[in-house]
């Protein structure tokens, strides 16, 4: 048994200047900018509690939007998604990048939001 759910909408922005992209998306979405990012490549856009997390990420590929699925058991969730037809592309910093049969990229990550345990879907493997 493991749990998972949609954790984050990630706005991938090509190029190293995450701060400029963060300013635009924060204003466009009515969210607060991150004050002191731990890693300048990633910028959280703070919204109301309980709302989906939004992250701006500087990338070296064309700009796009992708989803993060949070889980308490990454290998089990990756296996479940592979059974559904997704393909594992690579592992980065402890998370797994996958591709849906539709060609959309997404990541499987550790729990990101504080209410994960109470609100995630339980999967009986």
Image (tube, grey):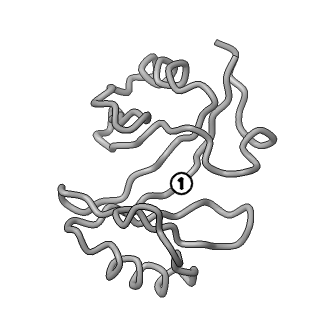
Q: Looking at the rendering, which quadrant does residue 122 occupy? A: top right
Q: Nearer the viewer, residue 74 or 103?
A: 74
Quadrant (top left, top right, bottom left, bottom right) of the C terminus: top right
Residue at x 47% of width, y 36% of height: 108
Measuring from the top left, give residue 76's x and y in whole percent: 55, 19
* Residue in the image at 67% along x and 29% along y: 3
Number of residues whose C-alpha sits closer than 10 Å to that of mark 1, classed few (under 14), some (14–19) or many (20 or more): many
Query: Which element type, helix, strand or loop, lies under badge 1?
Result: strand
> Residue 111 at x, y = what percent?
62, 41
Residue at 25% over, 58% down: 59
Residue at image mark 1: 8
Location of residue 103 in the rendering, given as x and y in whole percent from the top left corner: 28, 40
Decide which of 74, 29 is in the foreground and name it.
74
Locate residue 7 relative to residue 120 in the image: left or right: left
Q: Is residue 67 above or below residue 3?
A: below
The one of 84 and 50 positioned closer to us in this rendering: 50
Image coordinates of residue 54 in percent, x first then y, are: 52, 64
The image quadrant of residue 106 is top left
> Residue sitting at 20 percent across and 68 percent down?
15
- Out of 20 and 76, give the one closest to the viewer: 20
């Amino acid at each position: 048994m493991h749990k998972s759910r949609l954790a984050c909408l990630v706005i991938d922005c090509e190029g190293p200047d995450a701060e400029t992209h963060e300013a635009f998306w924060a204003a466009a979405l009515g969210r607060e900018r991150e004050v002191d990012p731990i890693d300048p490549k990633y910028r959280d856009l703070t919204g109301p509690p309980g709302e989906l997390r939004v992250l701006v990420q500087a990338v070296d590929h064309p700009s796009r939007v992708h989803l993060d699925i949070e889980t308490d058991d990454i290998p089990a969730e990756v296996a479940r998604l592979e059974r559904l037809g997704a393909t594992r592309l690579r592992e980065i910093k402890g998370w797994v990048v996958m591709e849906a049969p539709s060609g959309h990229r997404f990541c499987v990550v550790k729990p990101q939001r504080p209410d994960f345990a109470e609100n995630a879907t339980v999967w009986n493997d």
